[in-house]
Image: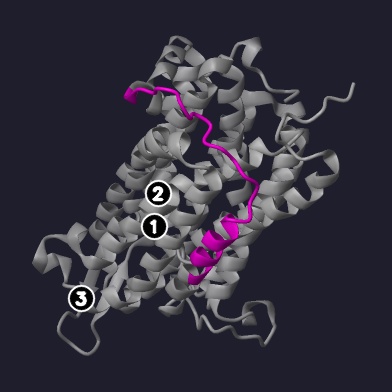
Amino acid sequence: MNIPPAPGFPPPAAQGAIGARLSVMMFLQFFVWGAWYVSQTGFMLDKGMGGLISWAYTVGPIAAIVSPFFLGMIADKFFPTQRVLAALHVLGGVVMLLVPQSAAAFVDSKTSGAAYLQPYILLLLLHMLCYMPTLGLTTSLALTHMTKPERQFPMIRVWGTIGWIVGNIVVGGNLKTWGLDVEWIASGDKSPMQFYVTGAAGILLGIFSLSLPHTPPPLKGTKSSVRQILGLDALALFAKPSYLVFLIASFLLCIPLAGYYNQARNFVEATGFTNATMTMSYGQMSEIFFMLIMPLCFARLGAKWMLAVGMLAWVVRYGLFAGAWGGAGSDDVKWMVLGGILLHGICYDFFFVTGMVFVEKSAPPHIRGQAQGFLVLLTQGLGMLIGAQAFGWLVNKHTSVVGQGTPEQATIVAWDKIWMAPCIMAAVILVAFVVLFRPSKATTIEHA
């Protein structure tokens, strides 16, 4: 039976054009994030701002915690989605253009004692406060204009991953890693050009957003409470033991996960790779592959073992990183570093994407949105916030200076000890999850 599109929606013949625009939206959305988020540590270390790295990766989780209030109280009630996207991306892009100049105002946090008040950190916070709400807005806008979202959304969303990869490539500065003598204006991940590229892309996306399909505010004329915005109605799901185990495991796993975003690029460079940011993009390339084969894996493994395999991938990744440090700079161990990066597809898709599906299957229809929002608040917000600060402490603990005050002064980072800590933590979470997680038949997703 053919169901006609809802009033105000385009006829099927127009769906292709809308799909193309949504794909461009997703591409630019994640290009903006990928063009600086991993590579910024190269710039920070080059400018002597290594002590701020943990704070630079704390602003994102803070924005993730704040964004539900913005979405629930303003964006979802008063303004069309495409206009909100336009305003946020243009403002966020302008702010990012100011970031390189803020490095000149840097004062060593060890002497100032106020790392979180550094202009660099404050500008990144303002940018992320603009950016984080757009992640939910682009998803909701795309889903609103799809006739068969379960089939169409993955094909649209994959362009976001491609955008992240292209952002890494552009900022990487050249393609010599792949044997091609091609150099970009970005001049490498130590260059301030990464922030200018990001800012320009953000402004472009803001302007492009005005061409997106008109999407009225979904909650116009309704009342919403703080409880609903934070997804606290979803706390009723805690009565299901398997759901509670899943949430606790997700929260705890995001603590060591923060370390990967914080320091993996610096570790990759320390192990002898000449283009660390581009090397890191291999992880997103593997994500595309594993996203495509996920339906087959669902049919074979089901919810519990999909989640468990995702957790195991984190254990193996950190173990490979720790083991590789003993032979840093040697070609004999570079495969271990690459292997850890390529596991990103399993780490992310099998655990986080499967987790979203599990929440969707576990929650009653009227609180599914709140349940997904609460999951993001718990993981990308609180978990990553704690992890960013904890990993900053861990790196400082295992960093020492040899020959201080002499021309031979060197900074020694015990990467093996740093990576072994999240490896052990992820392993403990995995074992506890396998023992305690027993989903009911109603929440299995073998045929999702």
Lower position in the chain sequence, tag 3 or tag 2: 3
Which label's residue is closer to the chain start, 1 or 3?
3
- Amino acid type, callout 2: Ala
Label 1 sits on a secondary structure element that is helix
Mark 1 to mark 3 CA distance (whole Å):
22 Å
Please say whether residue 212 is one of the residues in the magenta stretch: yes
Identify the mark at residue 105; answer none if there is no mark.
Answer: 3
Q: Left or right: where does residue 45 sit relative to residue 293?
A: left
**x, y percent for residue 44:** 33, 72
Give yes or no for residue 17 being in the magenta stretch. no
The foreground one among 326 and 111 is 111
Q: Residues within 10 Å of mark 2 (few under 14, many from 20)?
A: many
- Residue 337 appears in the picture as rendered: no
- Answer whether residue 370 is visible to the viewer in this image: yes
Q: Quadrant of the C terminus?
A: top right
Relative to 176, is 440 above or below? above
Measured in 3D between alpha carbons, the distance from the residue under mark 1 to the one under mark 2, in whole angstroms, is 6 Å
Question: Marks 3 and 2, Cα distance to the nearest angstrom?
Answer: 27 Å
Could you tell me if the residues under marks 1 and 2 are in contact, i.e. CB atoms within 8 Å?
yes
Nearer the observer, 420 or 71: 71
Q: Please tell me which residue is depicted at 30% across the width and 70% down the height of the picture.
A: 412
Q: Which residue is mark 1?
A: 262
The residue stretch that appears in magenta: 200-226
Q: Observer-nearest residue: 26 or 73?
A: 73
Seen at 32% across and 57% down, the residue is: 126
Q: Which residue is mark 2?
A: 258
Give the side of residue 406 with respect to residue 302, left or right.
Answer: left
